[in-house]
Amino acid sequence: MSGATHVTAPGPRLYDRAAELAAVARLTAPAGDGGILFVTGGPGEGRSVLLARAADDFPGRAHRIAAPGHRAPWSGARALFAALAPGAPEARRALRTARGEDGLATAVSGLLGGLPVLVCLDDLHLWDAHSRAALAAAWRRDRAPGRPGPRWLVSAARHHRLPDVPGAETVRLGRLGPAGARALLRDLCAPPPAPPAVRRLVEEAAGHPGVLVSAVRRLGTARLAGDAPLPEPPVDGAVLTEVYGGFLKHLPADARRLLTVVALAGRTETNRTEEGHTDGGGREGARRLPGVAVDAVLGGARAAGVPVEPLDGLVADGLLCRADGLLRFEDPFLGRAVLVSAPASRHHGVRRAGAPRPVRTASALARGERHRADRLGPPAAVRALAPTARGRSHLVRGLAALAGGPVMDAHEALLRAAELLRDRAPAEASDARFLAMEAAWAGGDVAACLAALDCGGDAGGTERDFLDGLGAALTVRLGEARPALARVVARDGAEDDPRLLLRAGSAALVLGDTAAAARIHARALARARAEHRTALLPRVLEHLAYAELRAGRYSRAARTAREGLRAAEPVEQPNTAAHQHAVLALVASVTGDGPAVAEHAGLALGTARPHGLVQAATLAEWALARDELGRGLAAQAAARLVPLVRPGPRGGHFALRMLVVPCFVEAAVASGRTAEARSAAGEYAVWAAQGLDGPAPALLARCRALLAQGEEAAYWFGEAVRRHDGCGNDFERARTLLAYGTWLRRRRRPGAAREPLRDALVTFERAAADGWADHARSELRATGGAVGGTADRTAWGLLTPQQQRIARFAARGATNREIADRLALSPRTVDHHLRGVFARLGIRSRVELPGVAGPDPRAPGQDGGTEAKGLVSSRARRSAGSS
């Protein structure tokens, strides 16, 4: 549970819970044959305490399992298996081999095996949907009459819809009575509190155990003993945030915003001033906020740009009560907690009863605090503001569009903000210029980028260098661009502001220094985290993911992009999320994970197309084409790539067009579109000579090899491999080796083809690029190397340390299962490594390993030899026992 639910007296002790304890006693009775009991309640009402009490009282084995810290698919199932069978290989295997909800339900039933255990699952509503569905299936399956089995005690928030399980019982926790509240107070306080403090706290807490616990902890001994006056009010905003904060955090964003509209409208009905009650203060206790008209709430929500669709769900879940055309909170404390947790900008962004609309709009826009204010009011209200306020209003409008709207709308708003703020707020004007350039860059509009750069005529220092250098680069005046941008990159060490570091990182990317770009953006990320810049964090992660992608650090790029997705969701930045999905699609095209490519590319394009995100759309389409090319669909890949390499406004993104050309050339040559490939390669040669991309010379040589006739191709393949050695992108080097080996095989030179194909296979396997590895393995098999080649003793040193260790175990006779158990791997992983070993060494199976395995660098009797002997001897002992 959230908030103060976990803050309980030692014991745990319960008050006014006779009916609930009786239900637990029926569940855990020794004569029982299993069952399930659902316990529901609001935040802080004692669900976790009841589960702890049941686990302590149960005479047999009890497991108490909290909700996992993240909600990725099957994360709850992993937490369940880890708690029920920690470290058991059987449990890990059951979880790995389970397929779908029914498969996992079978695994859960098999794991418990009818044992008389008590399993206490806390916060079912916070478990991921996959795990909840599998658990429900297991509960329905195990409810056969007369069949002994585990007892399940499951807690969930009151608004959560519980699964329909035959024979299950549900108890709903309520508030404490006065006697129970006083007993809990005496249990919490040592020495006992003074009678006036008791009376006041019992009145204010209104029987809510979590509120009472949190208030007592915050007041301290002196106030409780009467030596110091109680604060006014005792149950303040800090108490409500502690109890309800976690609950509100896990509600969908649109539901939270609509609850804020209802709470603010209800507070307005009280005729109290906003300043005196931002913390839910006053001696309200648990009195309800007044009911407000449904039509007024819907009108205020639409005026503030808040979706009204969640309303029916909030009423059905019991968070809001709708009667006689009025809305009110079912739990008054929840309404006050919503007021406390809502940002100040949201308070000003919601329509207030009786306030003239232009006044409300001007007030919200003048603050310029959050992007939601941009949806308020007609243009006349904006024109009535002072120039600085108008500039800031355009700035927040631009930020809103940049985060989740059409990016060229963002460009126009930010450009206008830069003009209005130039003489009045130079720092904000500088930010607006850079953001306008970013918006135009994301939209693939060079002219708009230049317009944003040109409006900074009064800039100086580093900003002047950045504006001049990027403008020169966009107009292909690289002689002027390089020194100016190099000065920006060189001064990154003096910058501490993450916004300025983003500019330095962008300058490094334009110069083609991907290593510097990744380093600078990593520094910006560290600063943004240290300063808790939650709104800026997704943008920083977007820049860093792209820099790592350009540097060929695919696993790092994927990790950063996934973090970027998690950061973008709570602050509602779908445009940033689209870019991260595009990066993940490209990484998946490297690893050969076709379903992941399709999923992430689809999510990226779903936002990129309507919002004009040309950069993200180009990355996503490129990923789809690379996946098609890897699966042998060259004609389809070439058709997809043609628009991306075409110049002009209807083509791909101007900064990505040349990066896509090598992939297009490969697909076009394979599908017979040689003339188009030759034209694209000629343009690529001019671009590669500019030195803006490290791998470009090697990739140009590969393009020329693919287009060459006769033995000229061998020369260019050799040049490509040589140039790859100095650029550091192992994946592209492996693709060149694969193309070279394929060319040699088709020229009927199988012996010469094996070496480049083996090198490519090893690299693909190290990068976990399974699809490309399968392609290389197929080509190698066609040469005879994978099925009948001569063992290559000299290739042992090219194996990874993990491959060498696995190969030594296998050479001594250990099975995949024994190797997996010893090295904490799965048998499938061991098999994957062994197949790579066989291909690299040119052998058929493990029986040939003893003849090619290199010497163990450790002394006899130490780690390696002892482990293998231990594996073999343990197998022998098992065989003897079974006989």
Image (cartoon, helix red, strand yellow):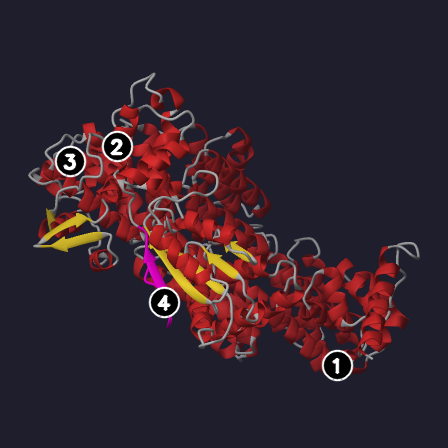
Q: Toward the viewer: 670 or 57?
A: 57
Camera-side mark, 3 or 4: 4
Badge 4 marks a residue whose secondary structure is: loop
The amino acid on which the numbered mark 1 sits, given as a three-letter code, is Thr
Q: Which residue is identified by label 1?
A: 783
Q: Which label was assigned to residue 362?
A: 3
User: Is 242 part of what is drawn in magenta?
Assistant: no
C-alpha span from label 3 to label 2: 24 Å
Query: Left or right of 618: which side holds 280?
Result: left
Identify the residue at horizontal 81%, vertical 82% (top origin).
Answer: 788
Q: Which residue is identified by label 2?
A: 279
The residue carrying pointer 2 sits among few (fewer than 14), some (14 to 19) or many (20 or more) residues within 10 Å by Cα, namely: many
Q: Which label was assigned to residue 163?
A: 4
Residue 247 horizontal/vertical position (percent)? 35, 47
Q: Toward the viewer: 324 or 62?
A: 62
Magenta stretch? 160-173
Camera-side mark, 2 or 1: 2
Q: Toward the viewer: 290 or 600?
A: 290
Badge 2 marks a residue whose secondary structure is: loop
C-alpha span from label 4 to label 1: 57 Å
The amino acid on which the numbered mark 3 sits, given as a three-letter code, is Ala
Say whether disc 3 or disc 2 marks the residue closer to the N-terminus.
Answer: 2
Say whether disc 3 or disc 4 marks the residue closer to the N-terminus.
Answer: 4
Residue 584 horizontal/vertical position (percent)? 49, 59
Query: Left or right of 177: which side holds 631?
Result: right
**Is the residue under label 4 in contact with that under label 2 (CB below 8 Å)?**
no
C-alpha span from label 2 to label 1: 75 Å
The amino acid on which the numbered mark 2 sits, given as a three-letter code, is Asp
Camera-side mark, 4 or 1: 4
Quarter in which the C terminus is drawn? bottom right
